[in-house]
Image (cartoon, rainbow, N blue to C red):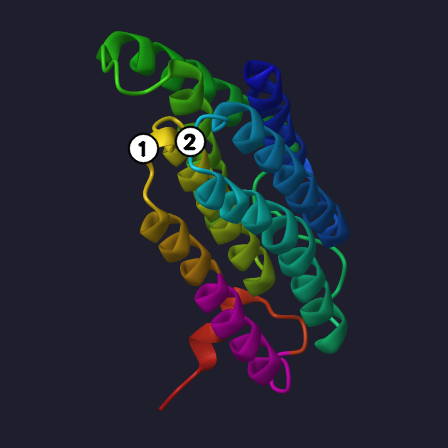
Amino acid sequence: MVNLILLSFLATLFFIITAWRLVTYLQILALQGVLLFAAAFFSLSSMHTANLAFILLETVVVKTVAIPFFVGYILKRNNITREAEPLVPVFISLVLMVSSVILIFFLSYASGFSIFDNLFFVVSLATVFTGLYIIMTRRKIITHMMGYLVIENGVFILSLAVGNEMPMMVNMGILLDVFASVLTLGIFLNKIGDVFKDGDVTQLRRLKD
């Protein structure tokens, strides 16, 4: 069951890397939150009840509801256009994505690290790669924030590989990291939206002391 959930999560990466509309990004982030909830529920069944409840609460309330809602509010608050404006054609993005997944797959099976479940390792690294790729190939600041959230999801999946030994403080650190980054970037976007209406990162070159 967990493997099917992870493969479904991997499929969402292909959707988000080819998406043109920012609303689609939010929908995929919410769907990833649901999949992370399911993966945590089935893979961490032997974890202490309090830790498991915290992780499930984090995935449902924060990743599925709060973060997509907050990012959607930023879009409306700054009147950001709905297009993600990728710099790389969709076909090239798909080729790079498929190539990276295949490369990560072979590297994970050649590594011989028994501490990681191979599928967790493949999906987590593919997720981190997708987030970095979104940050490097999108024009808007808001999509850079979404790319960071995708990276955080990859880190969360990697932690599930050793989830039954994952301490409570690690979960709190991940949650606080997400809140700090989203709130900071949200304030940043609310302020910079008064000057740069479309949120294009190329306009940051005009900023001066």
Asked which secondary structure carries label 2, the reply is helix
- Nearer the observer, 183 or 47: 47
Q: Amino acid at mark 1?
A: Glu
Magenta region, mostly helix, strand or loop?
Answer: helix
Task: Mark 1: give few (<14), some (14-19) or many (20+) Cα within 10 Å.
Answer: few
- Nearer the observer, 165 or 86: 165
Q: Amino acid at mark 2?
A: Leu
Tell me the quadrant of the picture where the N terminus can be found. Answer: top right
Q: Quadrant of residue 46?
A: top left
Residue 132 circle label: none
Q: Is residue 20 left or right of residue 118?
A: right
Asked which secondary structure carries label 1, the reply is helix
Contact (CB < 8 A) between labels 1 and 2? no
Measured as percent of width and height from the top left, residue 5 is found at 61, 22
Magenta segment includes 112: no
Q: Residue at x 26, y 19 (%)?
A: 115
Q: Residue furthest front?
A: 49
Relative to 48, residue 85 above or below: below
Quickly name the residue at label 2: 160
Measured as percent of width and height from the top left, residue 133 is found at 47, 41
The segment highlighted magenta reads 179-196
Tell me the quadrant of the picture where the C terminus can be found. Answer: bottom left
Task: Mark 2: give few (<14), some (14-19) or many (20+) Cα within 10 Å.
Answer: many
Q: Please tell me which of labels 1 and 2 falls first in the chain.
A: 2
Q: Is residue 83 left or right of residue 101?
A: right
Relative to 196, residue 65 above or below: above
Quickly name the residue at label 1: 165
Relative to 56, residue 200 above or below: below
